[in-house]
Image (cartoon, rainbow, N blue to C red):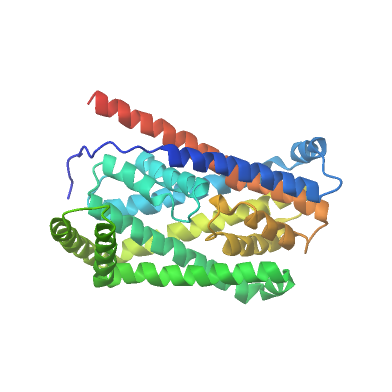
Amino acid sequence: MKQKNTKPNEAKLVDKKQVLFMILFVLIAAMSVWAIASQSKDFSLPEFWTLIQQADTVWLISAFAGMLTFILFEGFALQILCRAFGYRTGFRQGFIYSASDIYFSAITPSASGGQPASAYFMMKDGVDGMMTTVILLVNLVMYTLALVVIALLCFVLRFDFFLAFSPVSKILILVGCAIMLGLLSFFYMLLKKDTLMQKLCLAVLNLLCKLRILRNREKKQEKLIAYMDQYRAYSKLISGHHKTLLFCFLFNLIQRISQIAVTMFVYAATTGKSLAEAIDLWFLQAYAVLGSNFMPIPGGIGISDGLMLDGFQLKMSEDAAAYLDLLSRSVSFYSCVIICGIAVVAQYFVNKRRTKHP
């Protein structure tokens, strides 16, 4: 089902709201780093730099590889979903779809804030609009399901770590898990219970019309029902691709495991511990992810750092925990956001040039 490239209306990928989100992201990140540094009485930038210089190069490279795997494997998941429906997407396209999702999710107060950006690039590559919606929704289900599996691993294998967290951290972790399970159920219903999606869309349309934001309700309702018929057909098609769904889930699981492993690799690099000794840091970092991933703060900044410091101090001193937090977050999050942001902006201007000079 190969389709010709379409020319959808040029969307503004970066508007005033996104600029404000970027500024907010930088401010929160700066405040978070300051809070971590000030919490440690003996913290100093020269000592932090010395720690990096003396770190094991192999383990540091492994940490950066884990961060890159996080970007690449979401791209593989989206790529395999696109190919299942006849859209020829390559490595570059998959990387951009993933990078745009990660970048905009990081700077916007939503775990799924990058979905519209991914959709923008997918439709620019000729993927049908409704098919794009279904593909991104399926990937979101598999992404959330991967986190559920990680949560089960943590609670089954290292429940003692959960019990050792502070009361506030425990509440955040439990709330994060509850939100995760709720979203998984909701996303699944949107895919399998197509009437729910139609009712939600109609309710929003009626509300917008009552508020006089939209007009011609009958025409728009007819158009919406036609779109929903198309969505229903696509969502039923995806259920027949069991192998594709399995690979999509595995790619999302590898993506999450590799990102969480960055902290483990950084710990091994800076302490000289073996990987077997560093594995506890993987579970502690996983709990921090579960407690911060769905919080309405750009990138979970602040909440994630608080959970990490709380957990890391079970294995090391307060000062060592602060250094590990800053270095691992610099690799797994800040470096990742910078790489994704550069890739997204570059591809955006490439698309603009192609539009002007087809």
**Residue at image coords 82%, 51%:** 319
> Residue 211 falls in which quadrant of the image?
bottom left
**Side of 272 where 292 appears, left or right:** left
| 283 left or right, relative to 244 | right
Q: Please report the residue visible at 51 percent of the width from the left and 50 percent of the height from the top.
A: 70
Please state the horizontal and vertical placement of residue 272, each as a whole percent of the image.
78, 50
In the image, 151: left or right of 118?
A: right
| Side of 332 where 310 appears, left or right | right
Placement of 291 over or under 302, stated as above or below: below
> Can residue 334 be seen by looking at this rendering?
yes
Q: Which residue is farthest right?
A: 42
Q: Nearer the viewer, residue 42 or 78?
A: 42
Nearer to the camera, 137 or 224 = 224
Q: What residue is drawn where x is 32% and y is 64%?
A: 243
Q: Residue furthest top?
A: 357
Residue 281 lies in quadrant:
bottom right
> Looking at the picture, how far across and down is residue 160, in whole percent?
71, 74
Q: Is residue 60 above or below residue 358?
A: below
Residue 327 seen in render = no
Instruction: Give the percent coordinates (x, y) of residue 254.
Output: 50, 57
Number of numbered discs: 0
In the rendered image, which quarter is residue 212 located in?
bottom left
- For the C terminus, the image quarter is top left
Return the x and y of residue 161 as percentages of the image width and height: 70, 70
Q: Could you say which is closer to the camera, residue 135 or residue 210? A: 210
